Amino acid sequence: MNDKLGEPWQVKSLEQVSTFRRGSFPQPYGNPEWYDDNGYPFVQVYDINQNNKLNSRTKSRISEEASKKSVFIEKGSLIVSIQGSIGRVAITQYDAFVDRTILIFNDFEKYLDKQFFLLIIKELFLRQGEIADGGVIKTITKQTLKNFKIKIPPLPEQKKIAEIISGFDRLINLKVQKLNKSKIFSFPLVDKLLSSNDLEFVSLSDIAEIVRGKFSHRPRNDPDFYGGNYPFIQTGDVPKDELFIGSHSQTLNERGLSVSRLFPEGTLTITIAATIAEVGILKYPACFPDSIVGITPKLNKCNVVYLFYIIKKLKEELKSLAPQSAQSNLNLEILNAFKIPLPSLDVQHKISKLIKCSLENIELQKKDIHKLKVIKNGLSHDLLSGRKRMTT
């Protein structure tokens, strides 16, 4: 790769290089007659994944009657989402019918490589999605589509560009798969340390102080209580696969603090409403509402990282104890009585080290993936815009 110019790139409109049309589906979407669990695959926006492919099975399958009013595409078709999450692209792996939120490209000029065209379309539509028409649900209109301009290098250069960018995508996907396996909360060495037959089971209240969060003022969103120096943790701030809570979306001022409660650094938090039994350890002092509970291990009784791990491991069991209602919630009575295995402090400290080491490894993997994505995005922009040229 160098900056020496080869043959000049052409600039053409989207309708000059391909034909395209939207998918279709009979209305209303909620009509049960349109669906059949054993019917035809039906592609909607959420069926297009981040790997430029369809999910192995579409979320919905449609009936014979609905298929007559939809649009059929063959395996190998190039599609892109044009409403909602704009810019998801795929070359399909199977025959399917397609929703109206999807644009289908049919015929391409012979000088276009399909993989290169997919990449240029993805770049173009993601950029256009930021300024698309509409309010909450954005849409790219037919008139806008006609005016789209794309830059097209010679065919050999297209193939090289597609090869380089696709190579980055494959490497990132492999690293993401490895990361996802690492995120599964299963540690054989920890399980071995907890396999003792004489392991003691104790109630949470025996080994920790359990205190519910607080924000007593109503309405909760009164702006007079926000915008100060005290972090205010919400259930959405408690991470699903990390040890520490290191960020927050809101802060309280002095008035907010007066109707809330400040928990010290190192407090184990657990969500008890809406999202149940997600846990994290505070990296700094913070307040939180009554949808979160703070758990502080009693001195010389329990290690906080061990407590994090064991609650995470027993999450489903804990969730099953929540009263069944329109919205399940845990309460202090359930938490206080909840039984956990308690090995010696020495074993707890060993488990803590293993957990920390594993989660630090996950963080390193995340940083590696982020770095690759930054490099790939910058390179993609340069290659697809013609700022950098490929020798052929």
Image (tube, rainbow, N blue to C red):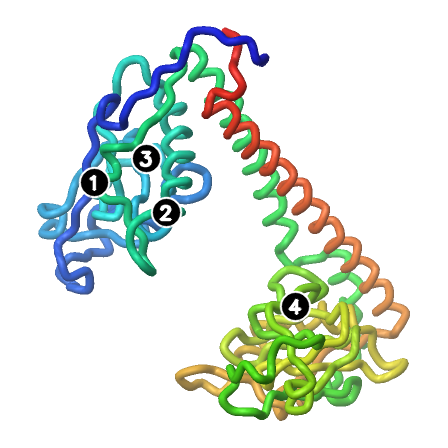
Task: Please state which of the two labelled residues, at mark 2 or mark 1, is closer to the viewer.
Answer: 2
For label 2, the crowd category at 10 Å Cα-Cα, with few meaning under 14, some 14 to 19 and many 20 or more, is few
Mark sitting on residue 103: none
Residue at 74 percent across and 81 percent down: it is 263
Seen as rendered, the residue at the extreme front is 224
Vertical relation: 191 (above or below) 369: below
Vertical relation: 317 (above or below) 13: below
Name the residue beneath numbered marker 4: 313
- Whether tag 3 and tag 1 are in contact, CB under 8 A, the answer is no
Q: Secondary structure at mark 2?
A: loop
Amino acid type at mark 4:
Lys
| Nearest to N terminus: mark 4 or mark 1 | 1
x and y percent of residue 161 in the render?
48, 20
| Nearest to N terminus: mark 2 or mark 3 | 3
Cα separation, mark 4 vs mark 1, equals 51 Å
Name the residue beneath numbered marker 2: 131
* Side of 287 relative to 216 (left or right): right
| Nearest to N terminus: mark 2 or mark 1 | 2
Name the residue beneath numbered marker 3: 92
Mark sitting on residue 142: 1
| Nearest to N terminus: mark 3 or mark 4 | 3
Cα separation, mark 2 vs mark 4, equals 44 Å
x and y percent of residue 107 in the render?
22, 23
Residue at 81 percent across and 63 percent down: it is 351
